[in-house]
Amino acid sequence: MEEKTINLIIIDDSFDSEEIIVSKLRAAGYTARSTRVEDDEDLTDAIKQHIPDIIIYFEGLELISLKETITCLNKDKKTGICRVISVSRNESGNIPVDVVSAMRTGAVDACYFNNIDHLLLIITREYQSLINRKQVSYCKKAFNESEKRCASLLDSSRDAIAYIHEGMHVYSNRSYLNMFDIAESDELEGMPVLDMVTNDGRDELKSFLRAYLQTEGGIEKFETQLLKADGTEFSGEMEFSPAQIDGEPCIQIIIRKEDAASEELERQLKLLSQKDQLTGLFNRQYCIEKLEAVISDCQQEKYTAALLEIKIDNFHDIKNTVGVIDADQYIIDAAKTLSEAADDGDTLSRYTHDCFALIAINYTIDNIESYAAQLQKAISQFETTVHGAQINTTCCVGITLIDSDSPDYDDIFARSEKAISIATEKGTNQIVTYTPQKGELTRHDVDARFKVQLTDALKNDKFLLHYQPVVSLHGDTDERYEVFVRMQTEDKEPLIMPQDFLPAAERVGMAIAIDRWVLYKTIQEYNLRKKTGKRTRFFIKLSAASIKDKTLIDWLSYQIKDKQIPANTLNFAVKATIAVTHLKNAKSLSHDLKKLNCGFILDDFGTGANPFQLLDHIHVDYVRIERSFMDSLTNNPKNQESIRTLAEEASKLGKLTIAQHVPDATSLSILWGMGVNFIQGYFLQEPLPTMDYDFTEMSG
């Protein structure tokens, strides 16, 4: 999956040299992105556009010398690590290359141009050296961050933890100090660990430690009587394991408190799982659970209630003005505003990116709209400034009443979604209370009809596959297509799009069957293309149900062996939100797919406070950037900066980036400059039933 891309600047007054070098690198398996410059002004402009990996300087230029080249690079720390290779055009070789002089000036090496194979070896060596340096730098940074996190975890741990070196305390956390009634860690540093044990147990502990130091380490436990500072004795189990502190080997001691798994800790963990990570409000899953309980109470006539869906008006424009990341800050502030305006006892949740859901207790048709108006007023009066941009907007509210005759939560949500849809169609700052029509189908009724239609489509092959090219921005001409599914109607036109039937398929338990059909048909298509000499890679989306399907990996393993499918042919996409919700399953699936040489794509990636935290748990080959970053990209520097940051961080981690929904050629150019690896979108080609895109169009 690794893509070897070298960013070159060639300093020469001839076009031929650039063409020869790029051609040789491509033949050697590298993607070369090159810029040719002739003087110091050109060089300065070039490095402002893109930081090069390697600069090839041709000796004898009048407009810029090797020394001036090095001086120009050393002005900026970012370019100070670039490798400069000095090249001589002397064809006869009667004038020796002065390697020593070139290296003293600042070049990494020097050679003749007529020995192009030598130059190629130097380039590949220095490129690998640069990669190694970046990886070492990243590892050092990651290690330092890890040490900080570990130190923080140790300090805040409920377990009593200490480090000893040569039998003496060198570190202890607050829980350890509290356990022995010691006020400050300074009082403990340098104190023998034997002093923490009663006199009767010291010889036994001494023998234990002597034997432990002669082993290869591991975890060993020792039960004894411990001694507090005031002489009070208590029983305890000491757990010993090898560790390091400030790079020096030592022994870690843990004395676990009996209440480490206390009810309070369990309560806090449960509360954390119910919260939205961005706003701190309750999340959608908790909202569903709470709504089910409220519906049950209303059906027993304990009270009446209402579900209010609150949608921020013009949020698309806000994102275009301040960018995706800063738009999230507005959502955080809006959440606080709504929390303050909501009644005590009501449940406010973040429902979708720009929508909130409020479960209001003891409201009826007579007073619910005045409550909604109160919430609207709070949003309309709220103003905030994000990086100089003043934001003030309104909201629409869709209301569904809940009483003793109300259906289940699915239908309540369906009604609130209809209400908010009607409200937003009317304009901004609207309130709509949804009234069910006589004979109106419930979601259960709709799903039952869809189940019949989906079953028929599976039995009679009424699904169709469409394909959209995923195109490299850096010269890779391998065929890559994302696979989309459509469903035929009785008249075969128009086709039913996936967003219109897949949600119902998930609700009625048919998502796995449809995913499996798509995968099977994709494998069949691969075999057909293989016979014509085509080597195609496919990107296939998986539903939440499929990532929990324990039979998928065994079935897929058999198909790969039976059809002799090459590595990296099948790549599976899972939305980041689904991966978070089903983290254990997503982690297991990603590692199982890696063993089968299949790729894993984290879809709709990049939002939230720390999206890369997910990559600590899941093996990922590609990250596909969330589509909202593409909105008005050419006029939105905030989104451009966010994409650049995502691409750079992904590259450091060895992940390839895909930009989806690319709208135009200008956006394509911007994404290329940011280091994004692949693009897709209707600008290149809409999903079609055939695969005939010319992947060589962008290779030059």
Image (tube, helix red, strand yellow):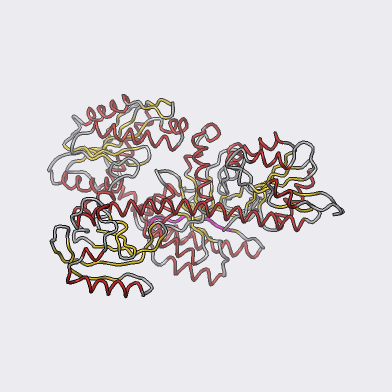
Place residue 634 in its image quadrant.
top right
Residue 134, percent across and down? 55, 51
Residue at 19% x, 61% y is: 258
Q: Nearer the viewer, residue 165 or 253?
A: 165
Residue 558 vs 4, above or below: the answer is below
Residue 182, percent across and down? 20, 54
Q: Nearer the viewer, residue 168 or 152?
A: 168
Magenta-colored segment: predominant secondary structure? strand
Residue 626 vs 28, above or below: the answer is above
Q: Which residues are magenta?
A: 537-544
Residue 15 vs 109, above or below: the answer is above
Query: Is 540 in the magenta?
Result: yes
Position of residue 41 in the picture relative to residue 681 (left or right): right
Q: Nearer the viewer, residue 501 or 293?
A: 293
Position of residue 185 in the picture relative to residue 82 (left or right): left
Residue 122, percent across and down? 70, 56
Q: How many marks?
A: 0
Query: Is 601 in the magenta?
Result: no
Question: Looking at the figure, which quarter contains the N terminus?
Answer: bottom right
Q: Is residue 397 visible?
A: yes
Residue 168 vs 681, above or below: the answer is below
Q: Nearer the viewer, residue 469 or 92?
A: 92
Residue 533, percent across and down? 67, 63
Residue at 43% x, 29% y is: 387
Q: Is residue 462 visible?
A: no
Place residue 414 in its image quadrant.
top left
Residue at 23% x, 73% y is: 203
